[in-house]
Image: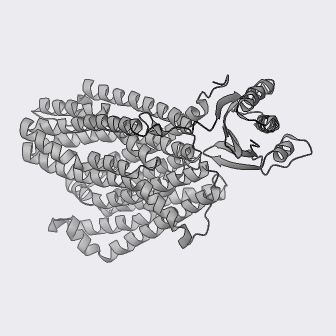
């Protein structure tokens, strides 16, 4: 083990840097749904709330599409960026965004053309059709804006700009809530004002993106794409299908459980189930934020084949998930009345409500880990595994288990279904993972089923301080490692020189107000070449294009290396230096 063995602080710092913006973005969307429903209900009455619910499949369709394209596309983008293939990253982003625009336009145009049929399909109350149709029309038109904008927002963490997505989501949803009141109260638009407010909010989001581009706060590298790039769209769809199925399965699950709760306990049953699902919405803020912070970083690390980095990242992810899961479990177990107070629920059978919330909330100890594994295996290209997890969590597990448990325990069996399924799933996932690793004959290891490094490929993996006074000792450590694995002393010296010049260059280009005090180094010695990967956080510094004076760090580095590849991914400088091994 090296004296400078990797500590994981750079990956940890990047994860927590992404975590707050992604959580806040989820909060903005969740609060919008919550407050928006309250405003519509108070201004127009409960019948308006019913019509909003009738149109919910449309919003679900939007979510399925932008999660399918955005999540899958951002994974592909980050993975190619990790491989130092920015051209492929840009093509993946472009083809996915173009697809989102075309899909949004197709849905909007088709929906408006067949609006009468769609209204009759979604709204079964003839007396409400006249008010429902204008609302649905504007909502369908808004898909042309919502889908591409949300795809962009999902990509922002992969661009290293998660806070911009948060700003856009908070602004768009804040304007939506404000304009609900303005359109309905002052312009007397009726229910159509609610969908007009949604459209207005997302148009403002698009305007913010335009301002960011003009002010050069962000650069969206759109490139020309053709038929040859469609495989990137296919890759993105494969990576996003599990998440899209999860959204779809959620709809089926809610519809089934609504009917089952009514059949078992009448309106009281659906009221309790609705409160339980509101608890899910609250917990989803933490789950969604943690997963959104994990996905782009894990994808980039996989592109670099930095499996130890992935393990370090997943340790942080699992720790954050465990803490949030226990916190929410205790919250709802100790203060279940908090939920009833928020929604002003008063019932002569309050003991049933409290018991339902407490039984249901046991699920929160397990389900977050199920979601993490679903996204993780999607990133690791175990797409069938991820889809199976998504389907069982969504509806394939809930429906049969609920039918069995409600026969035995009545309505309490429905509340038990969710924690029982989550517990069974996490036990099965962990068991299957270990079995895959155990039967792989050393190819994979551990609960994450990560590929093991080739034992014939020596690896030097370290975190080193960017302190010029310590560089000599650091270089000696790496050169000693090379001497023990290379027959050519000259090659060892050349690697050490390249390493020293890269460290010196990184230290010199940090600037006065730098936050970078160390960098990660990953050296792999192959039979025909040596790969030296150097990763640091901070402002961009590209040694492959920087001006080089004679005998400067960059000049020496270029003369020693066979090639230098650089990429700036998610606020991290990633430099790959290739040298001929000479063994």
Q: Is residue 534 left or right of residue 99?
A: right
The colouring scheme, among rainbow, by chain, secondary structure or one colour, is one colour
Q: Nearer the viewer, residue 515 or 211?
A: 515
Location of residue 319 in the rendering, given as x and y in whole percent from the top left corner: 44, 29
Location of residue 461 in the rendering, given as x and y in whole percent from the top left corner: 64, 32
Q: Residue at x 36, y 55 (%)?
A: 244
Does 277 sit above or below residue 381? Answer: above
Q: Is residue 537 left or right of residue 263?
A: right
Does 38 sit above or below residue 462? Answer: below
Q: Is residue 353 left or right of residue 65?
A: left
Location of residue 230 in the rendering, given as x and y in whole percent from the top left corner: 51, 67
Location of residue 531 in the rendering, given as x and y in whole percent from the top left corner: 69, 43
| Residue 183 image-quadrant placement | bottom left
Q: Residue at x 25, y 26 (%)?
A: 333
| Residue 141 image-quadrant placement | bottom left
Q: Nearer the viewer, residue 468 or 151?
A: 468
Q: Is residue 579 left or right of residue 235?
A: right
Does 573 sit above or below residue 431? Answer: below
């Amino acid at each position: 083990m090296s004296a400078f063995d990797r500590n994981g602080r750079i990956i940890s710092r990047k994860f927590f840097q992404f975590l707050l913006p992604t959580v806040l973005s989820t909060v903005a969307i969740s609060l919008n749904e919550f407050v928006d429903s309250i405003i519509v209900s108070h201004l127009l009455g409960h019948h308006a709330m019913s019509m909003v619910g009738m149109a919910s499949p449309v919003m679900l369709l939007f979510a399925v599409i932008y999660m399918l394209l955005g999540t899958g596309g951002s994974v592909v983008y980050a993975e190619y960026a990790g491989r130092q293939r920015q051209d492929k990253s840009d093509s993946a982003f472009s083809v996915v965004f173009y697809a989102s625009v075309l899909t949004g336009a197709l849905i909007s145009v088709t929906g408006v053309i067949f609006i009468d049929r769609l209204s009759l399909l979604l709204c079964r109350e003839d007396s409400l059709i006249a008010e429902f149709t204008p609302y649905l029309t504007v909502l369908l038109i808004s898909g042309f804006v919502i889908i591409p904008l949300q795809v962009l927002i999902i990509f922002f963490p992969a661009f290293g700009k998660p806070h911009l997505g948060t700003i856009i989501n908070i602004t768009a949803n804040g304007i939506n809530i404000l304009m609900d009141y303005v359109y309905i109260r002052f312009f007397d638009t009726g229910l159509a004002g609610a969908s007009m407010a949604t459209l207005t909010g997302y148009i403002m989001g698009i305007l913010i993106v335009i301002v960011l581009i003009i002010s050069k706060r962000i650069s969206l590298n759109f490139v020309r794409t053709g038929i040859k790039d469609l495989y990137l769209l296919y890759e993105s769809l494969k990576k996003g299908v599990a998440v899209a199925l999860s959204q779809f399965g959620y709809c089926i699950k809610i519809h089934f459980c609504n009917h089952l709760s009514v059949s078992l306990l009448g309106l009281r049953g659906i009221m309790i189930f609705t409160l339980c699902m509101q608890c899910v919405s609250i917990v989803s803020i933490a789950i969604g934020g943690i997963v959104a912070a994990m996905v782009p970083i894990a994808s980039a690390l996989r592109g670099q084949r930095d499996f130890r980095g992935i393990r370090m990242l997943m340790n942080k992810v699992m720790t954050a998930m465990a803490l949030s899961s226990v916190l929410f479990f205790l919250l709802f177990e100790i203060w279940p009345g908090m939920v009833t107070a928020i929604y002003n629920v008063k019932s002569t059978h309050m003991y049933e409500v409290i018991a339902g919330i407490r039984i249901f909330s046991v699920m929160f100890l397990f389900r977050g880990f199920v979601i993490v594994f679903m996204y993780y295996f999607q990133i690791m290209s175990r797409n069938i595994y991820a889809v199976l997890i998504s389907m069982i969590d969504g509806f394939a597990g809930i429906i049969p288990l609920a039918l069995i448990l409600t026969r035995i325990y009545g309505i309490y069996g429905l509340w038990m279904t969710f924690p029982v399924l989550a517990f069974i799933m996490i036990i099965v996932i962990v068991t299957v993972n270990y079995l895959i690793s155990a039967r792989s004959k050393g190819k994979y290891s551990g609960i994450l089923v990560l590929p093991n490094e080739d034992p014939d490929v020596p690896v030097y993996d370290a975190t080193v301080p960017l302190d010029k006074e310590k560089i000599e000792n650091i270089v000696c450590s790496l050169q000693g490692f090379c001497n023990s694995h290379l027959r050519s002393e000259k090659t060892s010296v050349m690697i050490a020189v390249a390493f020293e010049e890269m460290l010196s260059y990184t230290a010199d280009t940090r600037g006065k107000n730098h936050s970078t005090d160390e960098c990660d180094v990953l050296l792999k010695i192959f039979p025909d070449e040596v790969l030296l990967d150097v990763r640091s956080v901070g402002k961009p510094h590209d040694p492959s294009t920087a001006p080089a004076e004679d005998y400067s760090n960059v000049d020496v580095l270029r003369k020693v290396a066979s090639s230098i590849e650089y990429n700036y991914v998610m606020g991290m400088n990633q430099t790959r230096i290739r040298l001929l091994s000479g063994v």
